[in-house]
Image (cartoon, rainbow, N blue to C red):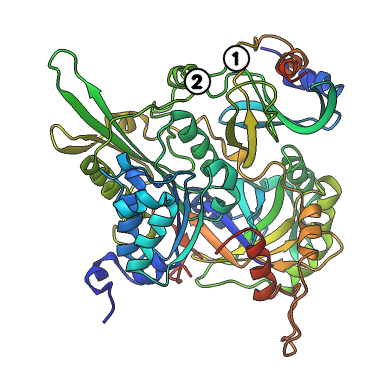
C-alpha cells in the first residue's frame, strides 16, 4: 500500500510519472502556496521554488503554510513552501532560491511545467516568453478584486490559463495587451496593496493543479493542449472562457517555433565548460560504448552545488 | 553528458506521416529537423523548431544502397540551419514499435555528412535521428572531429507530456 | 518600417558583434561588450536593445548590470533566457534609426 493508492484512477504508472516530474513555482504568494501544497499531496516529485519575498503580517490571511511564528522570524516564502512540501513528501527534490525569478532563470529551464503566481502583467509576459523559448507548458493564475461603483459591491474574479507551445498565448487571449503593459509601466510596475483573499486563490490553484495532473498523467484520453478558465467568486463559477474558443485552431503568431532555444548558445563554449568540470573518480572499467563516455554523477553533483542547488 | 530532445507532438505526428509516404524508388524517405539548443546545467536540451522533408526529386538512385539524397537536398538542409543558427538533425523512420536502432548504412553515411554541417553552422551541434512508430533513437555530434553522444531522452510536448513517446516511464 | 538588416549594419559600427534576435514577435539587438560612457569613464557591459515597444515602453535598452548612480527605478528582467536590468527611461522614438535609439537610451548613463 502506498500513500497514493486512492488516486490510481489517474492511470498506468501515474505515481511514477508524477514523481519524476519537476514543476517550477514562480511566486510563492497566496496562489502558489496552495499549488505547492496540492502538488505535494498529489505526488509531484520535483519542485523549483522562486520568490524574493518574506512573509509579512498581511500575508497571513492567505499564505498556505504560513504561521505567525514565520512572520515574526521574517521567513522567506520559498522556505515556507518547501516546509509544506517536505511535511507531505520528505523525498521531494526541492530547489529553492530567495530571488526574483528573472535572476534564477537557469533553475527553471529544466522544469517540465511552470506555474506562475505573479501580480504584474509585465512579469507574466516575460515568464511566458521564457517558457515558450524552452518549450515548457506554462500555467498562469491571476486574481482581481474590482469595486463595482453602481452597487458598491466588490467583484472577485480571476483566471487560470494553460499556455502550451504552439497554442494561443497570453497575448492571443488578451490577458497581456500593450495597453495594460503601458499602464503598468506608467505606475513603475507598482501593484500596491491589492485586495487578496484565500478562497479564490484556492479555487484558482485547484484548477491549475488539475491542469498539471492532466499534463502529466494518462488520466484523460484527450486532454486539452490549452485552457482558459474564468473564475467568478461572486457567482461561485469556474467556466471556460470564450476568448479561447474564438482562438482555437489559429496558430499563435507571437511565438513562432523558429525562436525556440537559447539564441546565444554556442556548442564550442558548451564543450569548454563541460571539459572544465572535475574529472570523474576512478571506477571499475566501464563497458565499451560506441559513443563518447558520460560524466560521473559526482562531477554533475559538483556542478549543481556551484549553481546553489540543494 | 546527458542530452534531451523536446518536440511538439503535432509536429512529430506530421513527420511520421510524411516519412511513411511511399517514394517511387527510395525505400526510406528522409527529412531534416532544425532545432534550438540550451544548456540546462546538468544536461543539454535540443528544442525542435521545424521539419523539412527531402523533396521527391532530390533523391538519387544509388547502386550500393538503393537510394540516397543528392547535393541539392543537402544544400537546402544546411541553408535552413544557417540563420537563425540551428542544430540540423537528419531523420528517417524504420517503422515498427519500440526503440529503433541505426543500421550500419545509417551510421557509415552519417559519419561522412554530419561533420560537414559544422562547416556552415559551427556553433550548433548536429545529429541523426531514427524513429519507430512510438519511439526514437538519436546521436548528436558536438564537434565534427569527435564521436557522437547518445540522445538520452525524447520528450513529446503535448497533452499529456510524454517521454520516449511510448509506454515508457517518465523517469 | 525600417529595414532590420540595414539598421543592424548601422548598429555594428557601434558594437561590432551586434546580433539580431526575436522574442514575442519583436526584434531584439544583442550588443555584446558594449562600451558605454558612465559617470565620466567608460564601462563595458552587454546590452539588449528593443527598438520597438516592449513592456509598455515605446523602445527600451536592457543592460547586463544596473548603474545605480544613474537613472531611476532600475528593474530586473529575463529576456532570451538571460538576466537584464533596465532603468525607467521612456519616450525614445521608435521611428528613429536603431543607432539613434541606442544613443538616446545611453545618454542618461553619462
| Numbered tag placed on residue B121 in the rendering | none
A44 to the left or right of C100: left
Crowd tier of the residue under label 1, counting other residues whose Cα lies within 10 Å: few below 14, some 14–19, many 20 or above: some
Q: CA distance from mark 1 to mark 2?
A: 9 Å
Q: Which residue is mark 2?
A: A185
A91 to the left or right of C78: left
Q: Position of residue A1 (x, y in %)?
A: 26, 82
**Label 1–label 2 contact, CB within 8 A:** yes
Chain that bears disc 2? A
Q: Which residue is mark 1?
A: C90
Q: Residue at x 65, y 12 (%)?
A: C94
Q: Residue at x 72, y 42 (%)?
A: A264
C107 to the left or right of A32: right
* Tag 2 secondary structure: helix
Q: Position of residue C83 (x, y in %)?
A: 63, 39
**Of A242 and C26, the residue lying toward us:** C26
* Tag 1 secondary structure: loop
Image quadrant containing the C terminus of chain A? bottom right
**Of A259 and A51, the residue lying toward us:** A51
Q: Quadrant of residue A151?
A: top left
| Relative vertical location of residue B67 with respect to residue C46 in this rendering, above or below | below
Q: Residue at x 48, y 40 (%)?
A: A166
Crowd tier of the residue under label 2, counting other residues whose Cα lies within 10 Å: few below 14, some 14–19, many 20 or above: some
Amino acid at each position: 500500500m502506498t500513500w497514493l493508492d486512492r488516486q490510481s484512477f489517474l492511470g498506468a504508472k501515474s505515481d511514477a510519472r508524477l514523481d519524476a516530474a519537476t514543476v517550477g513555482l514562480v511566486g510563492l504568494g497566496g496562489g502558489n502556496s496552495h499549488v505547492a501544497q496540492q502538488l505535494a499531496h498529489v505526488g509531484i516529485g520535483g519542485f523549483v521554488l522562486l520568490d524574493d519575498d518574506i512573509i509579512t503580517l498581511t500575508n497571513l490571511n492567505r499564505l498556505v503554510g504560513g504561521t505567525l511564528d514565520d512572520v515574526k522570524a521574517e521567513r522567506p516564502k520559498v522556505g515556507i513552501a518547501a516546509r509544506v512540501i517536505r511535511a507531505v513528501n520528505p523525498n521531494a527534490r526541492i530547489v529553492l532560491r530567495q530571488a526574483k525569478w528573472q535572476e534564477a532563470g537557469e533553475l527553471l529551464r529544466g522544469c517540465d511545467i511552470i506555474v506562475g503566481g505573479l501580480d504584474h502583467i509585465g512579469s507574466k509576459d516575460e515568464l511566458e516568453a521564457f517558457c515558450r523559448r524552452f518549450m515548457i507548458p506554462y500555467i498562469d493564475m491571476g486574481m482581481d478584486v474590482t469595486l463595482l461603483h453602481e452597487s458598491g459591491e466588490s467583484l472577485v474574479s480571476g483566471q487560470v490559463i494553460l499556455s502550451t507551445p504552439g497554442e494561443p498565448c497570453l497575448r492571443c487571449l488578451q490577458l497581456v495587451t500593450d495597453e495594460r503593459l503601458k499602464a503598468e509601466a506608467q505606475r513603475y510596475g507598482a501593484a500596491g496593496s491589492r485586495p487578496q483573499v484565500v478562497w479564490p486563490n484556492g479555487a484558482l490553484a485547484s484548477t491549475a493543479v488539475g491542469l498539471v495532473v492532466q499534463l502529466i498523467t494518462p488520466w484523460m484520453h484527450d486532454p486539452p493542449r490549452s485552457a482558459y478558465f474564468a473564475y467568478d467568486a461572486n457567482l461561485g463559477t469556474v467556466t471556460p472562457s470564450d476568448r479561447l474558443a474564438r482562438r482555437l485552431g489559429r496558430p499563435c503568431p507571437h511565438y513562432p517555433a523558429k525562436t525556440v532555444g537559447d539564441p546565444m548558445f554556442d556548442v564550442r563554449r558548451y564543450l569548454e565548460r563541460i571539459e572544465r568540470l572535475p574529472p570523474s573518480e576512478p571506477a571499475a572499467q566501464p563497458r565499451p560504448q560506441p559513443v563518447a563516455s558520460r560524466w560521473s554523477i559526482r562531477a554533475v553533483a559538483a556542478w549543481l552545488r556551484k549553481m546553489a542547488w540543494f | 553528458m546527458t542530452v534531451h530532445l523536446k518536440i511538439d507532438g503535432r509536429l512529430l505526428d506530421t513527420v511520421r506521416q510524411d516519412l511513411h509516404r511511399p517514394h517511387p524508388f527510395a525505400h526510406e524517405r528522409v527529412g531534416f529537423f532544425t532545432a534550438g539548443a540550451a544548456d540546462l546545467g546538468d544536461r543539454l536540451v535540443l528544442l525542435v523548431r521545424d521539419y523539412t522533408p527531402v523533396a521527391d526529386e532530390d533523391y538519387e538512385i544509388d547502386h550500393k544502397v538503393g537510394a540516397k539524397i543528392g547535393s541539392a537536398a543537402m544544400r537546402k538542409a544546411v541553408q535552413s540551419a544557417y540563420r537563425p543558427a540551428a542544430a540540423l538533425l537528419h531523420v528517417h523512420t524504420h517503422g515498427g514499435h519500440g526503440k529503433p536502432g541505426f543500421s550500419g548504412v545509417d551510421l557509415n553515411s552519417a559519419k561522412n555528412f554530419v561533420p560537414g554541417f559544422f562547416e556552415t553552422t559551427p556553433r550548433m551541434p548536429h545529429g541523426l535521428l531514427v524513429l519507430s512508430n512510438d519511439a526514437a533513437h538519436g546521436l548528436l555530434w558536438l564537434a565534427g572531429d569527435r564521436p557522437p553522444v547518445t540522445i538520452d531522452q525524447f520528450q513529446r510536448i503535448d497533452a499529456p507530456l510524454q517521454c520516449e513517446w511510448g509506454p515508457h516511464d517518465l523517469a | 518600417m525600417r529595414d532590420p538588416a540595414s539598421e543592424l549594419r548601422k548598429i555594428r559600427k557601434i558594437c561590432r558583434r551586434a546580433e539580431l534576435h526575436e522574442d514575442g514577435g519583436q526584434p531584439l539587438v544583442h550588443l555584446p561588450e558594449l562600451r558605454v560612457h558612465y559617470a565620466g569613464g567608460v564601462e563595458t557591459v552587454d546590452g539588449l536593445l528593443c527598438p520597438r515597444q516592449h513592456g509598455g515602453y515605446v523602445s527600451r535598452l536592457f543592460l547586463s548590470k544596473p548603474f545605480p548612480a544613474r537613472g531611476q527605478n532600475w528593474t530586473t528582467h529575463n529576456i532570451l533566457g538571460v538576466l537584464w536590468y533596465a532603468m525607467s527611461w521612456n519616450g525614445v522614438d521608435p521611428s528613429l534609426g536603431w543607432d539613434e535609439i541606442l544613443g538616446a537610451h545611453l545618454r542618461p548613463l553619462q
